[in-house]
Image (tube, rainbow, N blue to C red):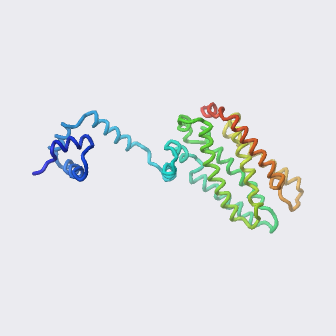
Amino acid sequence: MSWHVSEEDLRAYARGELAAPVLWSADTHLTSCARCRAVLAEVSDPVALDAGWDRLDAELDAPRVGLLEGLLVRAGVAGHTARLLAATPVLRRSWLGAVVAVLCLSVGAGHSVRGGEFPTLFLALAPLLPLAGVALSYGPALDPTYEMAVVAPMHGFRLLMIRTVAVLAVALGLNGLATLALPAYGLRALAWLLPGLALTATGLALMPRLGPVLAPSLVGGAWVGLLLLADALRAGADVPLAPFTAAGQGVAALVAALGAGLLFLLRDRFDLFQGRAV
């Protein structure tokens, strides 16, 4: 081989200062020239070379950035926050598929009822979906990324709120799309929204004392019991269940506000709750 990379260029190459197109020529030449590789080893700084290998190992070992995480980072979300959001269990296809299936069945039931009757099944199930999503997104028993979340450099309450916002955005978005597929019930078809917020806020407020499984379970059970009681009180009359009337919506809004206020007051307890096994 008649041409070799000069020692000066090799020193610049070792320092990472060699500019293109000379850099490209040196890269190609070094792959096939043992003599230039030997000179490069002599002029290279061992400390800088070891640091370069360490950076390469770190890049190779780094987990691949998923589509959702990449979009969040591009939108300005911090890297560690984007990773925690992308690892939220309810953003996985299995849970989303189950939610879509439930909504499709309830929408189908809404189309099968008589003309003026409420889509009661849909309105009963829709508020439970955000509550179930929150329950599946927090706590060591259900969250496979719980250990990573515990050591995340952020307040436990902030972590909970970040994931809750993600859950609500997905669940309420899917519920909203399902509402559009219902027959023409007008604004009455949105009667699930305030109960859903009330159930979620109440479940979150009870989590520090009851845990991420028991608290949503009790709140969900209370909702089902309330619906059964309301159905018994209306005695088969063709009228909406009490939670879906104007008075019931007002009560739901009040419960949502009280739950949010209690959650704010108890925010410091989530640091203790975050590290507690349940």
Count of number-bearing discs: 0
The residue under the point 28% across, 33% down is 47
Q: Quick one: which residue is furthest to the bottom in this view?
A: 115
Residue 104: quarter of image:
bottom right
In the image, residue 21 sits, relative to residue 162, either above or below, namely below
The residue under the point 54% across, 46% down is 87
Residue 172: quarter of image:
bottom right
Nearest the camera: 127 or 49?
49
> x and y percent of residue 108 in the render?
71, 64
Residue 246: quarter of image:
bottom right
Nearest the camera: 22 or 163?
22
33 sits to left or right of 212: left
Residue 266 visible: yes
Residue 1 visible: no
Nearest the camera: 35 or 266?
266
> x and y percent of residue 92 in the render?
56, 51
> x and y percent of residue 142 in the render?
61, 42
> x and y percent of residue 105 in the render?
69, 61
61 sits to left or right of 26: right
In the image, residue 36 sits, relative to residue 155, either above or below, namely below
Q: Quadrant of the C terminus?
A: top right
The residue under the point 73% across, 38% down is 262
Q: Quick one: which residue is furthest to the left in this view?
A: 2
In the image, residue 170 sits, relative to residue 258, either above or below, namely below
